[in-house]
Image: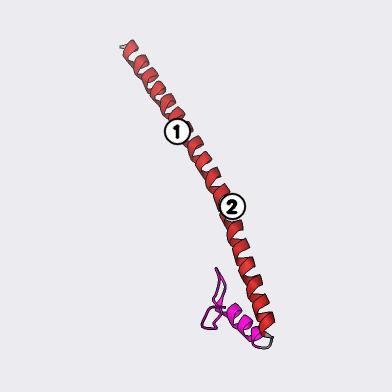
Amino acid sequence: MSENGKISAGCGVSSETVARRRAALSMVSPTMKALVDVVWVVWSVGASIYDYFHTSAMEERIYALENAITFHQCIIGLLSAGLALLFTYILLRKH
């Protein structure tokens, strides 16, 4: 809960979920409200850490893929240049 007594919606939480949580908290003791808030915070932090690690791993894979694509583009460029030189040699040799 925030300082003004309102429940803040975490990442990706709908207003309907917040409304249901607010209604549920109005029927419980302050201790239970605090416990629910602690669980909510721990869950949110855990989800954020999980997202960070999986995003970092995904970014590393994307970086490796970009490197592989760049390497293959260079190889394709060299092969294309070699093929163009070969055709030029064949055409100039016949004349």
Kind of residue at disc 2: Phe
In the depicted structure, whether residue 78 falls above or below residue 29: above
Which label sits on residue 53? 2
Residue 82 vs 72, above or below: the answer is above
Marks counted in the figure total: 2
Residue at label 1?
Answer: 73
Residue at 32% over, 14% down? 92
The Cα atoms of the two marked residues, 1 and 2, are separated by 30 Å
Identify the secondary structure beneath mark 2. helix
Residue 40 is situated, as x and y percent measured from the top left of the image, at 63, 71
Relative image position of residue 37 (x, y in whole percent): 63, 75
Asked if residue 25 lies left or right of residue 82, the reply is right
Image quarter for residue 17? bottom right
Q: How crowded is mark 2: few (under 14 residues within 10 Å), some or many (20 or more)?
A: few
**Which of the pair 79/42 is nearer the observer?**
42
**Tag 2 or tag 1, which sits nearer the N-term?**
2
Q: Residue at x 68, y 76 (%)?
A: 35
**Segment colored magenta:** 1-26
User: Would you identify the image quadrant in which residue 18 lies?
Assistant: bottom right
Q: Residues within 10 Å of mark 1 (few under 14, many from 20)?
A: few
Label 1: state its secondary structure.
Answer: helix
Q: Is residue 56 magenta?
A: no
Q: Residue at x 60, y 66 (%)?
A: 44
Question: Which image quarter is the C terminus in?
Answer: top left
